[in-house]
Image (cartoon, rainbow, N blue to C red):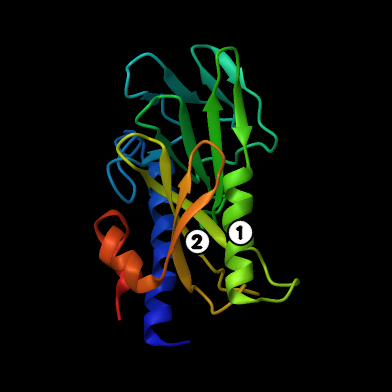
Amino acid sequence: MSQRRLIQLFVSVMMCAAFCSAASAQNCNSSGTPAWNESVRYVDADCAAGFLSPNKRLLLRFASDGTMSIKGMTVHLSVGLRLPTIMVSWSPRSDAFFINDGEGSGMTSTFRLFKIGPKRIYEDNATEKAAVSLYRLRTGCNRSALDPDVWGFGWDDGGSKIYLLVQATVHEPCGPPYGFISLVVRTSDGKILEALSETQTKERFGSLLPSSLFTE
């Protein structure tokens, strides 16, 4: 593996280390702190941290068993969360939020989008599926290859679009190990509006992502 790919491997290692540090911090100072940028926050299940929506009307809380609630209403999950390897981000519109689900280790990520309707909160997996499908199509990888990791790292100012980093795994990867692209997707239906190469990602989103991702 090239030096660049080895350095990119540190992104996931750093993520895991950050999660583990947050989980073990007895003073809870890490809970709710920024992850890659100000719009995405770490979740520490052992600390009583709430995540207030931008309109100040909704408070998202996480329990140590991986359940979520808003104003006391439990959010029913298709697949449970395994804390503490979680990052969360509210839409600027306060009508949705996403979670980067590290699935217990922090070395991987599944993108999970939750939308808030008039009477319910529901999970919409269209964006995750679209991102994975596009990456697999672009790389032409074998069916046996593992799906890439999908990370949300921001929204446009109005919340109508979500920014994603899609990165190949290091083991049984879909395409080159730790190759990546970024995507701009429409929040309403998960439609991919733009797909950016590594170079384009650095030019447009370099300030929102870990600098080690772009080290030559």
User: Would you name the residue on which mark 2 appears?
Assistant: 166
On the question of residue 94 being in view, the answer is yes
Q: Are marks 2 and 1 in contact (CB under 8 Å)?
A: yes
Left or right for 105, reference 61: right
Left or right for 38, reference 185: left
Q: Which mark is residue 132?
A: 1
The answer to which quarter of the image holds residue 158 is top left
Task: Return the residue nearer the eye: 100 or 165.
Answer: 165
**Which SS class for mark 1?**
helix
Task: Return the residue nearer the eye: 169 or 44.
Answer: 169
Q: As displayed, is residue 114 above or below residue 171?
A: above
Q: As displayed, is residue 48 above or below residue 172?
A: above
Distance (Cα) linking label 2 and label 1:
8 Å
The answer to which quarter of the image holds residue 135 is bottom right
**Which SS class for mark 2?**
strand
* Amino acid type, residue under disc 1 in the picture: Val
Sort mark 2 into few (<14), some (14-19) or many (20+) by Cα contacts within 10 Å: many
Q: Position of residue 64 (x, y in %)?
A: 55, 30
* Amino acid type, residue under disc 2 in the picture: Val
Q: As displayed, is residue 95 above or below residue 44?
A: above
Left or right for 175, reference 36: right
Residue at horizontal 34 percent and vertical 47 percent from the top:
35
Disc count in the image?
Answer: 2
Residue at horizontal 40 percent and vertical 24 percent from the top:
94
Residue at horizontal 57 percent and vertical 14 percent from the top:
73
The C terminus lies in quadrant: bottom left
Q: Mark 1 or mark 2, which is nearer the start of the sequence?
A: 1
Q: Residue furthest bottom?
A: 2
Q: Position of residue 24 (x, y in %)?
A: 41, 43
